[in-house]
Amino acid sequence: MLERTEQRAGLRPKLYQILIIILLYYSQIHRKLDHEIVQVIEDPPVKHFNHSIHFLWRVTRAAAEYLVTLSRDAAAPPIDCFPEFIAACEQNVDLAWLVHFLADFAFLVLDFKQSVRCGDSEALDLLWREFFSLGHTSTANKTQYIPMSIMRIFWSRALHPDLQKLYHALRSIPMSDRPGSMVGWDCIIEWLNGAITAGVSSHVSLESITRFIEIYPLLEHNYSVLREQTMQGRATEKREMKSMEEDVARLKSFFSRVIGSTWQTASASKSSSDLNSHSDARGVKPWDEVHATMTAHGNDSVTHCVATHARNLTRNYYVWQP
């Protein structure tokens, strides 16, 4: 049960227990590329989020392009048959880490972010479903997100059609009138928090903060009117990301060197990782753990987990049969 997101909007890229592994994996890439620890923070704080997400997009694109290149090898299985392609990649533990990094993490985060930006509520529900399988393992530590994923889907289906329509319409909030500028609910709260921090700089008290919040809508309205007047006739401001071509090229070259430049070398059997020094110490691979968790029986089954949370979190509204 899932949401394609904005890591600051909606869910943030700590969706899955593999995130920490991937961040450690990033650090290994930096160490191997530069032979020293440069910009490596294995558990980055929120203030370093933008640095982490910018690097994530570079690794995502480089890994995806590298896999596409391998898939064009005549000996490679069709990449469109993804289960078979993944199974073939798993012969080499390093290629397995790369393909699961994309399939189980990077594309999921990107999908979340894009769905929030365009307000695609149906896609967010689908992504919450996908997230459930990734966050339900014992090492994922997503004790709050799993009940959240269950209830997001429960209420999106249980609501009266009129309320359901309203719910989906308000799933994301527009930051401006530009397409793709939708944000998650928490973003508005963060903006207000930032405004309070900037606007109440001395004699901070509950009363002063309350007064600031009371006049904040008027301040914002006046600001928008002034901006409209002063910006009249000006061309729309456009911003572009810094080019990632050089970083992507370096990463692809690194993957080719460490994993293999042809399908035959990249898919050759290999159990000890050169990409992720934490791989062997971890024991069970994340994707194997997800499979075991999702196919468990009895009280450990997915059905039991969903039923338990749904009943506990709706008992004020429903009387469930045993």
Image: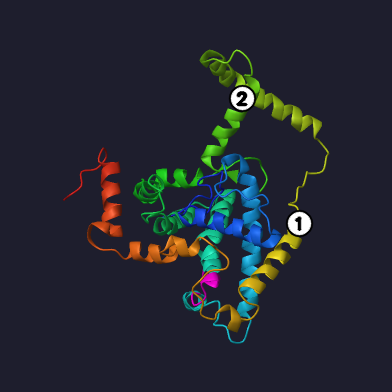
**Residue 186 is covered by the magenta coloring:** no
Q: Which region of the structure is painted magenta?
A: 90-96
The residue sitting at 65% across, 24% down in the picture is 198
Label 1 crowd bin: few (<14), some (14–19), many (20+), radius 10 Å: few
**Residue 94 is covered by the magenta coloring:** yes
Quarter where residue 243 is shown: bottom right
As rendered, which of 19 and 159 lies closer to the eye? 19
Q: Position of residue 137 (x, y in %)?
A: 37, 56
The residue sitting at 76% across, 62% down in the picture is 246
Q: Which amino acid type is marked by label 1? A: Ser
Q: Which residue is mark 1?
A: 243
Quarter where residue 126 is shown: bottom left
Q: Secondary structure at mark 2?
A: helix
Q: Is residue 111 visible?
A: no
Q: Which mark is residue 111?
A: none
Does 64 sit left or right of 270 as displayed? Answer: right
Query: Which image quarter holds the N terminus?
Result: bottom left
Q: Which residue is mark 2?
A: 197
The residue sitting at 55% across, 55% down in the picture is 24
Q: Earlier in the sequence, mark 2 or mark 1?
A: 2
Does 10 sit left or right of 313 as displayed? Answer: right
Q: Position of residue 267 (x, y in %)?
A: 55, 79
Q: Which amino acid type is marked by label 2? A: Thr
Q: What is the CA distance from the residue labelled 2 to the residue labelled 1?
A: 33 Å
Does 59 sit left or right of 158 as displayed? Answer: right
Q: Position of residue 95 (x, y in %)?
A: 55, 72
